[in-house]
Image (cartoon, helix red, strand yellow):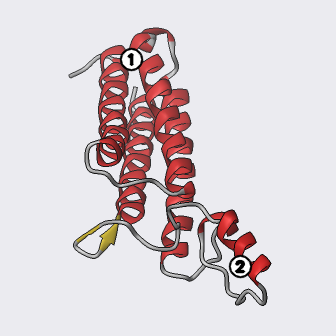
């Protein structure tokens, strides 16, 4: 079986690899695939960046870092990522109102000046229209699934550490 330190390091490295893979895929889809991110897409990248940093610290300082602290920190970051992604999915399905800068306005402009103001206030990429989907799931939906999976992985590691301590 693994020692406490090697299992913490392995957990951190797996979290690092998954987080780097998700963020790397988003960046590849933008720079190589030509999918421009909306305002919410950019916000959804921050939890993955934080997870990369936290898991890298966990991999480097695993023996000196409390495994429970590492797992709980990552679980909270992934929960925040899941919340952002869920909000974005809600905006895409028009269940929730999105940021005014990247969603369609509901009121029709009454003058040319109002139309110009609305157009100038809009971003080039709208948050309420999915730019890409696979099997009917948008990138925000895949991000939600990945965030939930990583949160579950972090909580499972946290639970395994607690069970292991209880049986000693």
* x, y percent for residue 40: 55, 57
Distance between the Cα atoms at labels 2 and 1? 53 Å
* Circles 2, 1 touching at the beta carbon (< 8 Å): no
Q: In this view, does 15 lie to the left or right of 114?
A: left
Badge 1 element:
helix
Q: In this view, does 22 lie to the left or right of 72?
A: left
In the image, residue 96 above or below residue 34: below
Q: Which residue is drawn at 30% across and 44% down?
A: 25
Which residue is nearer to you in this view: 158 or 84? 84
Q: Which residue is drawn at 25% across and 20% down?
A: 2
* x, y percent for residue 18: 31, 38
Q: Count the numbered circles shown.
A: 2
Q: Which residue is drawn at 79% across and 77% down?
A: 113
Q: Residue at x 53, y 66 (%)?
A: 127
The disc label shown at residue 115, or none: 2
Determine the image quadrant of residue 5.
Answer: top left
Please tell me which of labels 2 and 1 falls first in the chain: 1
Q: In this view, does 138 lie to the left or right of 102?
A: left
Where is the C terminus found, in terms of image quarters?
Answer: top left
Determine the image quadrant of residue 106.
Answer: bottom right
* x, y percent for residue 31: 33, 42
The disc label shown at residue 153, or none: none
In the image, residue 69 above or below residue 132: above
- Number of residues whose C-alpha sits closer than 10 Å to that of mark 2, classed few (under 14), some (14–19) or many (20 or more): few
Where is the N terminus found, in terms of image quarters?
Answer: top left
* x, y percent for residue 6: 30, 16
Badge 2 element:
helix
Name the residue beneath numbered marker 1: 59
Q: Which label sits in the foreground, 2 or 1?
A: 2
- Number of residues whose C-alpha sits closer than 10 Å to that of mark 1, classed few (under 14), some (14–19) or many (20 or more): many
């Amino acid at each position: 079986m693994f020692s406490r330190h090697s299992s913490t390091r392995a957990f951190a490295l797996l979290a690092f690899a998954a987080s780097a893979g998700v963020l790397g895929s988003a960046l590849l889809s933008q720079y190589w695939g030509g999918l421009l991110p909306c305002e919410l897409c950019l916000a959804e990248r921050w939890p993955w960046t934080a997870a990369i940093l936290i898991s890298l610290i966990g991999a480097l300082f695993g023996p000196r870092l409390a495994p429970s602290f590492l797992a709980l920190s990552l679980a909270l970051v992934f929960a925040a990522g899941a919340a952002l992604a869920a909000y974005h999915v809600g905006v895409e399905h028009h269940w929730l109102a999105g940021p005014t800068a990247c969603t369609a306005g509901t009121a029709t402009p009454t003058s040319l000046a109002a139309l110009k103001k609305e157009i100038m206030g809009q971003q080039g990429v709208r948050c309420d229209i999915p730019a890409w989907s696979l099997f009917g799931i948008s990138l925000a939906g895949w991000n939600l699934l990945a965030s939930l999976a990583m949160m579950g992985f972090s909580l499972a590691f946290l639970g395994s550490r607690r069970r292991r301590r209880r049986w000693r």
